[in-house]
Amino acid sequence: MTDDLARTLRACLPWTPTPVPEDIPHGDMPGDQVSIAPSHIAKATRLFPLLVEKLLSALGESGAGRAVVAVAGGSGVGKSEIASLLSFHLRAVGAGCYTLSGDNYPRRIPAHNDAERLRVFRQGGLRGVVESGQYTPERALALRRLGAAGADADPGRAADDPWLTVYQQAGRTALRGYLGTPAEIDFEELSDAVGQFRNGADAIWLKRMGRAEADLWYEQVDFSSVHVLVIEWTHGMSDFLHGVDIPVLLNSTPAETLAHRKARNRDGATDSPFTATVLEIEQELLASQAKKARIILSKGGDAMSYDEYRRAMAQTASGAHV
């Protein structure tokens, strides 16, 4: 880290936030809808000084004077908004910053990936029922009808049909083997881009992925004045992603993330039983990775220790009010 950058960051503490204009630059995911609310601003205001303290250490250890921050959390928790605000505040105090969306790096466009997730779940579920010896032509027909109605992942339908519980449990197991793995995401390509940044590259070709099959291209981004790369992504704490210095976890429950997704209207069928299943498995992944987080922020914007996070999630899982 250059002496000038160190002085710049130290000089901003204690920090007085710069007023946030209505429209600020956000991540590089094509067509992404970012709507910054007062709650996001309040959360970023609490988070920013904590991040600066971590950055001073990470930048000091970097030979190229660069650091990588990952803002992770469940779908719809506000990663895009918080990452955009952190980048805005870093630029405001004089630290060059770029916001990268990890959602540019799945192996399939969103519609195809959604279809693959569903295929993995259903294929795994069918195999589970067959291997348990409970598969019959009548149940095959029932599954086709439930699938056509988008209800085969609904646990409420399994209350009187134990074989459907077998189907759903086997489907979830198969889905866990796909979600957030290299089968779904090109971690290697993103890790390579992160490595180029950390090594001091002045320009990097970054992937862009839209929602149509032909919406795939690369854009060369100028990093010559960038000191901090902020990655906003559900899988920002994954063991498959290399080169992150400061993982930040924005905590939320599956119910809260589903509410966020509905309000944001990001994808179709956001309230489907299958979407709820995906969000629950995402939450399991985040919980397994949470120990790596250098900063954990509660839904209300309070910093949490890892032990506090575990207690909060345990209370949520037991149905207690958090």
Image (cartoon, rainbow, N blue to C red):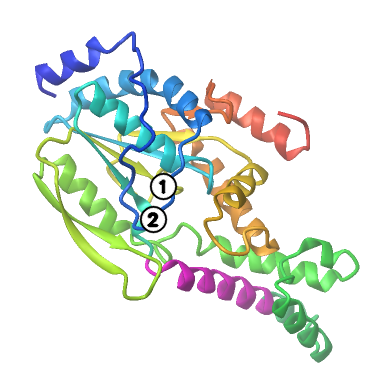
Asked whether 181 or 113 is in front, the reply is 113
Q: Of the residues shown, which amino acid type is indicated by label 1?
A: Trp
Please say if 129 is above or below 39: below
> Residue 281 at what x, y percent from top left?
60, 54
**Left or right: 17 in relation to 170:** left
> Residue 21 at what x, y percent from top left?
36, 30
- Asked if the residue at tag 2 contacts the one at tag 1, i.e. Cβ–Cβ closer than 8 Å, the answer is yes
The part of the image, by quadrant, that contains residue 69 is top left
- As drawn, the residue found furthest toward the right would be 160
Q: Magenta stretch mostly in which secondary structure?
A: helix
Identified at 43% across, 21% down, the residue is 45
Q: Of the residues shown, which amino acid type is indicated by label 2?
A: Asp
Residue under pointer 2: 103
> Residue 276 at what x, y percent from top left?
66, 56
Identified at 53% across, 29% down, the residue is 39
Classify mark 1: helix, strand or loop.
loop
Q: Residues within 10 Å of mark 2 (few under 14, many from 20)?
A: many
Classify mark 2: helix, strand or loop.
helix
Asked whether 54 or 147 is in front, the reply is 147
Q: Residues within 10 Å of mark 1 (few under 14, many from 20)?
A: many
> Residue 256 at what x, y percent from top left?
64, 42
Q: Quadrant of the C terminus?
A: top right
Residue 154, labelled with which disc? none
- As drawn, the residue found furthest toward the front would be 22
In the rendered image, residue 139 lying in the magenta stretch gets the answer: no
Q: Which residues are magenta?
A: 107-127
The part of the image, by quadrant, that contains residue 9 is top left
Q: Earlier in the sequence, mark 1 or mark 2?
A: 2
Identified at 46% across, 48% down, the residue is 234
Residue under pointer 1: 233
